[in-house]
Image (spheres, helix red, strand yellow):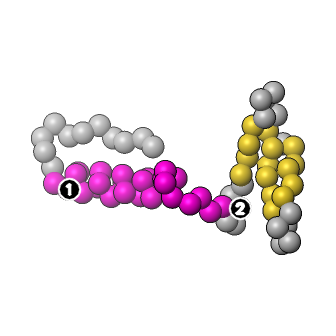
Amino acid sequence: MSLLRAPFAYSREDQDRLRTELDKMNAKNRKTAQDVEIVGSERLILSSPNGSRWDIQVSNAGALSAVAL
């Protein structure tokens, strides 16, 4: 996220825009102490100790698989 520099004088309109932008960005963040659900085109990518990266997938039957990236 890249925010513009603050105006020299206080501006309610600027604060409203800032808070709106921060709310939008915050909604995209994953939160701690909440379930993580990965849907659609999102992927779960894990890295192994040697640095290999793996895309974790699940079938309709619930079988897990890992695809090397």
In magenta, the rendered stretch is 12-38
**Cα–Cα gap, marks 2 and 1:** 36 Å
> Which image quarter holds the N terminus?
top left
Does 18 lie within the magenta span? yes
Q: Quadrant of residue 17?
A: bottom left
| Disc marking residue 13 | 1
Is 15 on the left or on the right of 61, as rendered? left
Figure quadrant of residue 61: bottom right
Within 10 Å of the Cα at label 2, are there few (<14), some (14-19), or many (20+) other Cα atoms? few
Q: What residue is shown with label 2? A: 41
Quarter of the image containing the C terminus? top right
At a point 29% along the width and 54% down the height, the residue shown is 19
Is residue 53 something one can see in this rendering? yes
Expressed as whole percent of the image width and height from the top left, the position of residue 38 reads: 66, 61
- In this picture, is 33 found above or below 53? below
Q: List x then y, in percent, for residue 51.
A: 78, 29
At label 1, the amino acid type is Glu
- Report whether 27 appears left or right of 38: left
How many numbered marks appear?
2
| Residue visible at 24% across and 39% down in the picture | 6
Q: Is residue 15 magenta?
A: yes
**Which residue appears at 23% of the width and 51% of the height?**
14
Residue 21, percent from left and from top: 36, 54
